[in-house]
Image (cartoon, rainbow, N blue to C red):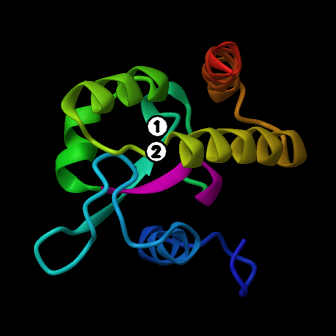
């Protein structure tokens, strides 16, 4: 929740995410600037029940956000590696765990839980 007791809007969440993670695309590593604009990237896609919470969002460039679409984070990290991009897998896993903790604390998000749990299992298997 924001300081005023309301949930932060998209622009405010993006600003908070950039402060938290830095000004680079989580997938391709490009630095954000005038030509490379940041977007909010949902780890658990909204179509899969993912909330628009800062714990479910990372900063990605428009190209990567559009290219990923609804591909699962573990599969998209593999695709990034195949493309030679320095994706930040550690940040992705950290945010998946942060989302898991936020859902445990706040409740709800039934649709997102199964998707999230499957992703965490896949990452745990990788080691």
Specify few, some or many for label 2: CA neighbours under 10 Å numbering under 14, 14-19, or 20 or more: many
Asked whether residue 69 appears in the rendered view, the answer is no
Is residue 55 one of those drawn in magenta?
yes
Q: Residue at x 51, y 39 (%)?
A: 89
Quick check: 81 above or below 114? below
Given residues 1 and 88, the one toward you in this image is 88
In the image, residue 87 above or below residue 125: below
Q: Position of residue 119 (x, y in %)?
A: 61, 21
The quarter holding residue 65 reads top left
Left or right relative to 50: residue 78: left
**Residue 51 picture quarter:** top right
Left or right position of 16 against 41:
right
Which percent across, then down, holds residue 82? 25, 24
Mark in front: 2 vs 1:
2
Q: Nearer the viewer, residue 10 or 22?
A: 22
Which range of residues does the magenta coloring cover? 54-60
The answer to whether residue 38 is above or below residue 77 is: below
Where is residue 14? Give x, y as percent: 45, 70
Secondary structure type for disc 1: helix
**Mark seen at residue 46:** 1
Q: Secondary structure at mark 2?
A: strand
| Residue 11 sits in quarter | bottom left
The disc placed on residue 42 is 2
Quadrant for the N terminus in the image: bottom right
Q: CA distance from mark 2 to mark 1?
A: 7 Å
Q: Residue at x 69, y 21 (%)?
A: 127
Question: Which residue ends up furthest to the right in the rendered image?
Answer: 105
């Amino acid at each position: 929740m924001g300081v005023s007791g309301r949930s932060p809007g998209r622009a405010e969440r993006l600003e908070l995410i950039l402060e938290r993670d830095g000004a680079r695309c989580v997938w391709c590593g490009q630095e954000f600037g005038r030509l490379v604009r940041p977007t909010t990237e949902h780890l658990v896609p909204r179509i899969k029940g993912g909330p628009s919470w800062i714990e479910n969002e990372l900063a990605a460039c428009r190209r990567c956000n559009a290219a990923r679409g609804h591909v699962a984070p573990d599969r998209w990290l593999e695709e990034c590696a195949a493309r030679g991009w320095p994706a930040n897998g550690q940040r992705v896993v950290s945010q998946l765990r942060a989302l898991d903790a936020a859902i445990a604390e706040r409740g709800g998000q039934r649709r997102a839980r199964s998707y999230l749990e499957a992703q965490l299992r896949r990452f745990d298997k990788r080691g």
